[in-house]
């Protein structure tokens, strides 16, 4: 069987109240998170901006 190059699987993680700390975001990145999805059902504009800053700082 021919081996395919690289890993094509991507991990999309939803960031919500239980996972929006800097420590948790870093853990998810180390575990292989490729995409961070924000759940706009929780929080407000300012809160989402802070989460985006945390994601950018950790990546």
Image: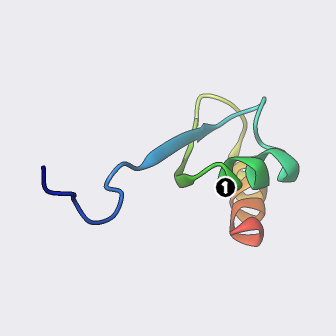
Question: Going by the picture, which residue comes out furthest to the left?
Answer: 1
* Above or below: residue 36 compared with residue 40: below
Give the mark count. 1
Residue for point 26% across, 66% down: 5
Instruction: Say whether residue 47 is left or right of residue 5.
Output: right
Does 9 appear above or below 6? above
Q: Is residue 27 visible?
A: yes
Residue indicated by mark 1: 29
Residue 15: give x, y in percent of width and height.
65, 40
Residue at left offset 72%, top offset 36%: 43
Can residue 46 be seen by looking at this rendering?
no
**Residue 3 vs residue 43, the one in the foreground:** 3
Q: Quadrant of the C terminus?
A: bottom right
Residue beneath the point at 48% across and 44% down: 12
Q: Residues within 10 Å of mark 1 (few under 14, many from 20)?
A: some
**Image location (x, y in percent) of residue 17:** 77, 31
**Viewer-proximal residue among 59 and 41:** 59
Q: Is residue 16 left or right of residue 34?
A: right
- Residue drawn at x 58%, y 52% is 32
Q: Nearer the viewer, residue 35 or 17?
A: 35
């Amino acid at each position: 069987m021919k081996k395919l190059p690289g890993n094509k699987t991507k991990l999309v993680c939803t960031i919500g109240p239980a996972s929006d700390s800097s420590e948790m975001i870093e853990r998810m990145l180390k575990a292989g998170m490729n995409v961070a999805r924000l759940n706009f059902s929780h929080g407000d504009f300012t809160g989402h901006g802070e989460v985006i800053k945390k994601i950018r700082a950790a990546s």
